[in-house]
Image (cartoon, rainbow, N blue to C red):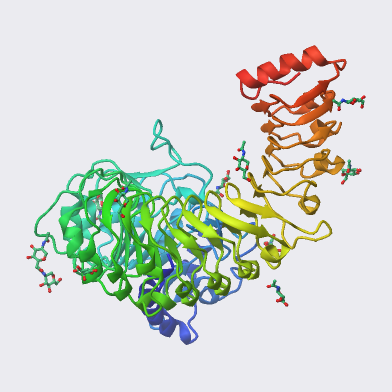
Amino acid sequence: MSSIMPSLMLFTLFVLGIFQRASSASSTCIKTEREALLRFKQGLVDYSNCLSSWTEEDCCSWEGVRCSERSGHVIKLDLTNPCVTPVPLEGDYRRKMVRGNCTLTGQVHPSLIELKHLRYLDLSWNNFSNSRIPAFLGSLSNLVYLDLSNACFAGKVPLQLGNLSNLQYLGLMTNYRDDSHEPSVDNPVDSHYLSVENLQWLSNLPSLRHLDLFGISIRNAEGWLHTIKMLPSLKHLGLGSCRLPDVPSAPHFNLTSIEFLDLSENYFGSVVPIWLLNLTSIEHLDHSTNFLIASSFPSEIIKNNRQLAFLDLTLNFMEGEILGNLSNLCQLSELRLAYNSFHGDIYKILGDSSACFHDTLSILNLGNNNVSGHLGNEIGSFKNLEFIDLSKNSVEGLIPTTLGQLQSLKYLNLRENKLSGSIPRGIGQLSNLYTLDVSNNHLNGVVTEVHLANLTSLTRLDISMNELAVSINPAWTAPFQLKYIGMSNCRAGPQFPTWLQSQRHISGLDLSNTSIATIIPYWLSNISSVIKSLDLSKNRLTGNIPGGFGDTMAELEALSLSDNFLNGSIPDSFCKMKELILLDLSNCWVSLQFGGSWTQIMLGFYRALIGPRTHFC
Ligand SMILES: *[C@@H]1O[C@H](CO)[C@@H](O)[C@H](O)[C@H]1NC(C)=O
Ligand SMILES: *[C@@H]1O[C@H](CO)[C@@H](O)[C@H](O)[C@H]1NC(C)=O
Ligand SMILES: *[C@@H]1O[C@H](CO)[C@@H](O)[C@H](O)[C@H]1NC(C)=O
Ligand SMILES: *[C@@H]1O[C@H](CO)[C@@H](O)[C@H](O)[C@H]1NC(C)=O
Ligand SMILES: *[C@@H]1O[C@H](CO)[C@@H](O)[C@H](O)[C@H]1NC(C)=O
Ligand SMILES: *[C@@H]1O[C@H](CO)[C@@H](O)[C@H](O)[C@H]1NC(C)=O
Ligand SMILES: *[C@@H]1O[C@H](CO)[C@@H](O)[C@H](O)[C@H]1NC(C)=O
Ligand SMILES: *[C@@H]1O[C@H](CO)[C@@H](O)[C@H](O)[C@H]1NC(C)=O
Ligand SMILES: *[C@@H]1O[C@H](CO)[C@@H](O)[C@H](O)[C@H]1NC(C)=O
Ligand SMILES: *[C@@H]1O[C@H](CO)[C@@H](O)[C@H](O)[C@H]1NC(C)=O
Ligand SMILES: *[C@@H]1O[C@H](CO)[C@@H](O)[C@H](O)[C@H]1NC(C)=O
């Protein structure tokens, strides 16, 4: 997203600039337009009183309203939701947005059409509760800018919008990632989504520079490329997740003015279209989740587009070598190539501290490919790196000590590689890091509290499946609250890791095969009321299971105590774990006393093993 902002903002500033000048002098409001605006407001529900200024006499000074200096007519209505904020996701780094508490709801009142001179209308990020986009908007013939994106409109897009022949900006995108549910295969276009009959109506909008229909299902999209060809000024084209049919390989298709192209999530399943390789002005290219087939990295895109800032080819069937000449891209900020079969040497990308993108690169996702080589200390000079995912590749050698210099780093996933040596202590300085996953490598050495010292943002820590020892002072107070901790196969015992006692939000805890040889501490049953998965298997745990386990872990879905030396009885409170799907108590008792509800519990285990979410006792 960030990379498209400059051109988008320039464009917006250009449009706004005109309006700002127009409204700078005191203009007084035209009475009939004031009344139309008031009726429009009556259709809206304004919980947080964003439109409190809409009572003053001069409607030209109302929040979001601008009038023409010359004619006094209302020419701009900008009611985009100002409270929208991004929330970072834990795995995928795409930003998810939340609308916040100043969202307007309600309906778009038809009185809007009385604002005949309106040139700019922005209602984005409000919530029109799955109502239709009103067809009467098609009669606001002076509109240059129309943004209805992410405003919870649903149903068919009215073809009347094709009457807005002056339109330069049309934003209708509807990003289901930000709303509660996604369309399913069974019910692709239910009443909560926007759809459009075809794209032919776009050919009446020759001035379009920005068109974004992301998430809108296009019912008859054959020939979409032909329609797009008729829009000579187009710079931003968003047709992601539109259910487009396969891209025809039009041999002479000139898209040289396109700067932003999103064709993601259309599941084309074809070869890389040749015309894509002829783009020359592209800054943002998203061709992810299209199952495209190519046997070489599309290096023409790199060669012809030095200004490229965003390249996403995630989840295709591409192979071939990721070439070192990526380093010619001086604006590159996001490179997402995960889930392909690309190979190449990671050192060619991150080992070149003179690489042109070395100040701009912030997101690097090469997960699930066949990348090899080692990470050099040069990585420390990529100061803006926020996200590194190299999981499931064949990267080997040491984790560079200079990683600790990447103060912007939020996400580091190196799992399932061939890294060796110890974890550098400097990692403990990354106060913005929220995910640290180095599991399934050949790392050795000792992890101490120094490695975790300043990780104040950390929520996920996975160091499992290495040859690591963990030695943390029992009196140490962790600076973080973790949601997931994986230490499987680390030597952490014989004492139970006491520092875990301060972690109150744990949802998953894996301490299997960690050489713990003691009793289960009484505090463990109290560790987190949201814990879903607890694995203490393959240790030398002795004594009883604390009685309160089932009382305090009501949401537990998976519990393994297998391969231990427990003694005593199964607490009756186990009956209260009503979400339990997976229970492994194999080979864990040296001596089991039969308690009162034993047969009931056995029956419960049986049910827990054969059917999900059945009641336990
Ligand atoms: C909206 O949310 C913000 C921050 O979450 C809060 O400060 C503000 O008081 C809220 N406003 C209303 C009207 O609830
Ligand atoms: C929109 O508002 C409706 C109620 O009018 C609510 O049920 C729905 O969850 C809201 N949608 C979003 C995305 O906030
Ligand atoms: C607007 O568009 C509709 C549907 O495309 C059409 O039937 C109608 O005649 C158009 N109105 C005007 C004023 O052009
Ligand atoms: C593509 O279009 C641009 C103008 O839009 C023109 O300058 C250029 O020559 C065209 N290229 C080809 C190969 O037709
Ligand atoms: C790519 O551009 C070249 C010239 O710049 C042109 O000859 C060729 O036909 C174009 N290919 C496609 C697929 O558009
Ligand atoms: C990229 O570099 C390779 C050698 O590493 C070279 O063969 C290739 O031609 C270069 N490609 C481009 C597009 O510059
Ligand atoms: C991974 O890349 C190497 C070359 O670096 C190649 O020999 C090997 O076959 C590739 N493996 C897969 C699974 O593609
Ligand atoms: C943690 O941060 C504090 C203050 O920023 C600093 O003094 C200390 O040296 C850091 N510790 C480590 C282990 O990086
Ligand atoms: C337990 O972890 C050690 C490494 O600490 C490993 O060698 C061993 O195979 C693991 N045992 C099991 C049963 O997974
Ligand atoms: C569990 O926590 C509750 C409240 O935080 C406390 O009252 C109770 O004594 C604790 N129980 C154990 C076994 O620590
Ligand atoms: C189990 O516990 C009982 C009583 O607490 C004790 O008598 C017995 O020796 C223990 N058995 C083992 C194998 O530890």
Residue at the image position 27 percent from the left and 68 percent from the top: 282
Q: Is residue 102 above or below residue 551?
A: below
Q: Residue furthest top?
A: 599
For the image, the number of numbered tags is: 0
Q: Position of residue 395 (x, y in %)?
A: 43, 57
Residue 440 lies left or right of residue 470; in this view the side is left
Work out whether residue 484 or residue 39 is closer to the camera in this orientation and state it: 484
Q: Is residue 334 left or right of residue 476?
A: left
Closest to the observer, 602 or 65: 602
Instruction: Describe residue 483's horizontal placement relative to residue 15 as left or right.
Output: right
Which residue shows up at 27% across the image and 67% down it? 166
Any part of residue 44 in sight: no
Residue 416, x across and y down, in percent = 48, 49
Task: Answer above or below: position of 116 versus 269.
Answer: below
Q: Residue furthest bottom?
A: 25
Q: Nearer the viewer, residue 205 or 418?
A: 418
Residue 589 pos. (x, y %): 77, 24
Corner quadrant of residue 559: top right
Residue drawn at x 47%, y 77% as measured from the top left: 381
